[in-house]
Image (cartoon, rainbow, N blue to C red):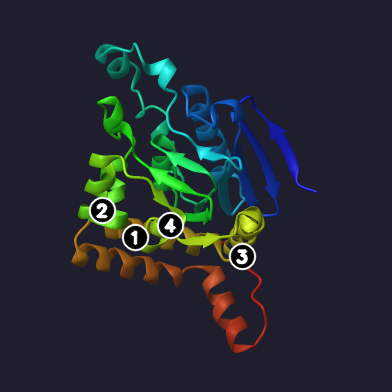
Amino acid sequence: MPESNASSTILTEAHGRVGLIRLNRPAQLNALNDELMDALGSAMLSHDANADIGVILITGSDKAFAAGADIPVMADWSYIDVYQSGFISRNWETIRQVRKPVIAAVSGFAMGGGCELALACDIILAAESARFALPEVKLAMLPGAGGTQRLPRAVGKAKAMDMCLSARMLNADEADRYGLVSRVVPDAELQTMALKLATQIAGYSLPALMAIKESVNRAHESSLSEGILFERRALHARFASEDAHEGMHAFMGKRPPVFKHR
């Protein structure tokens, strides 16, 4: 049985080498307030530091992954309020510190900040009921948790402009065609398939997973030549890894590898 503990805004469980984090504000459709983002960041960093965890899986409820930021709390804030408090920068960016793979399992609404949280993950597994949108323009606002930056990298400038300027909502099939999500699965199978995928990935050598994640992320943030150099050095470094030698010898011996995550 998985071990479980709860805060007021998230639930966490360990399933073998998978650390599951469930957003838990059902009455607010998992709207993302400071308390939730603090708890989420703390849980992610805890899993990232835990040698027994290889992959982090984030999910919500059947109705909503997360329905955006908590608008009633924000409605009367001033510029100096958000500037001095480091709004978004202080806790929403914690996910950028996580070196292990992070998977989002999305059903229902992923709106505004919820869509941006999913975009910040490494893989998005979407249920058929999933809906993605950045509707901040309706409030005379704009996406501010990476939406205007990560979305064009995922779907291209034209479609990102369409979503951000018109508040267009994508269903799961559209999100899949546009490259916003990694896979689409039936709603009834989302949790099972997300955990299966996370377990599969967590079974590989953790240092190799971390190197792959760093290399793919570098592709978004550097030139091709710099990215190739980074990838090449990461590959060279694998030859200093016990797991890489174990993997190659296991392949030659036609046996499953036994990784030590070293």
Residue 98: image x %, image y %?
46, 45
Q: From mark 4 to mark 1, how far is it between C-alphas? A: 8 Å
Q: Residue 127: which numbered mark, if any?
A: none
Label 4 sits on a secondary structure element that is loop
Q: From mark 3 to mark 2, how far is it between C-alphas? A: 32 Å
Is 132 displayed left or right of 244 in the figure? left
Mark closest to the chain's N terminus, 2 or 1:
2
Q: Which amino acid does label 3 sit on?
A: Gln
Q: Is 139 or 208 nearer to us in this picture?
A: 139
Looking at the picture, does residue 91 appear above or below residue 233?
above
Instruction: From the image, tell me which residue sits under label 1.
Output: 178
Q: Residue 181: which numbered mark, if any?
A: 4
Instruction: From the image, tell me which residue sits under label 2.
Output: 159
Instruction: From the image, tell me which residue sits under label 3.
Output: 200
C-beta proximity under 8 Å, tags 2 and 1: yes
Q: From mark 2 to mark 1, how far is it between C-alphas? A: 8 Å
The residue positioned 43% from the left and 32% from the top of the image is 68
The label nearer to you, 4 versus 1, is 1
